[in-house]
Image (spheres, grey):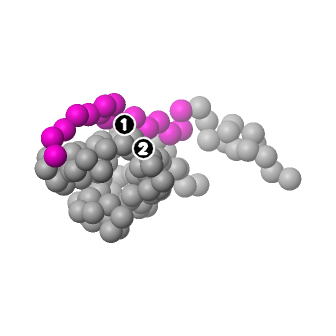
Amino acid sequence: MWQLGVLIPLLGAGALRVTQEPGELRVTAGDTVALQCQVEVAEGEAVLRMEWVRDGGLGVLCATRLRLGTPLSPSPCPRRARGAQLAWHPPRATLSLPQVQGNDSGSYLCRVTLEI
């Protein structure tokens, strides 16, 4: 039986590092907000699964598969994230939320998985 502990040495320490900006943001209703996520991967040709998740039971707002070295022009997210777009300019992803309203407030998390 395989255990997660077996996979950790294979990936190596620091195989994937994700940082998110800004930490906290205050905006005015009607503004466009850009949330950024920087991804650093030890492997040059990595395939990533990126998901932007929002608290409050809304779950995944936007999800896609990305290649580390291949940019992605802004593309729309599903209807759950009204007007939201995701762009990828390695090593940075940007989730744009246009014309935010009070019900858009909350915690947003950039979740990245390295596919092996």
Say whether residue 26 is magenta: yes
From this viewpoint, is residue 98 visible? yes
The extreme front residue here reads 102
Q: Which residue is mark 2?
A: 109
* Magenta-tinted stretch: 14-29
Q: Is residue 13 above or below residue 60?
A: above
Q: Amino acid at mark 2?
A: Leu
Locate residue 69, reporting x and y percent. Answer: 35, 52
Q: Residue at point 42% right, 43% down?
A: 109
Q: Is residue 60 above or below residue 14?
A: below
Looking at the picture, tell me which residue is in the foreground, 51 or 48. 51
Which residue occupies 36% across, 43% down? 106
Q: Nearer the viewer, mark 2 or mark 1?
A: 2
Q: Residue at x 26, y 59 (%)?
A: 84
**Which residue lies under the disc numbered 1?**
20
Query: 98 and 44: which one is in front?
Result: 98
The residue under label 1 is which amino acid type?
Answer: Gln
**SS for callout 1:** strand
Q: Nearer the viewer, residue 68 or 106?
A: 106
Q: Which mark is residue 33?
A: none
Q: Nearer the viewer, residue 28 or 69?
A: 28
What kind of secondary structure does the magenta stretch mostly adopt? loop
Q: Residue furthest bottom?
A: 79
The quadrant of the picture occupied by the C terminus is bottom right
Can you give x and y, in whole percent of width and height, for residue 44 in the image?
44, 47
Mark 1 nearby-residue class (10 Å; few <14, some 14–19, many ≥20)? some
Q: Secondary structure at mark 2?
A: strand
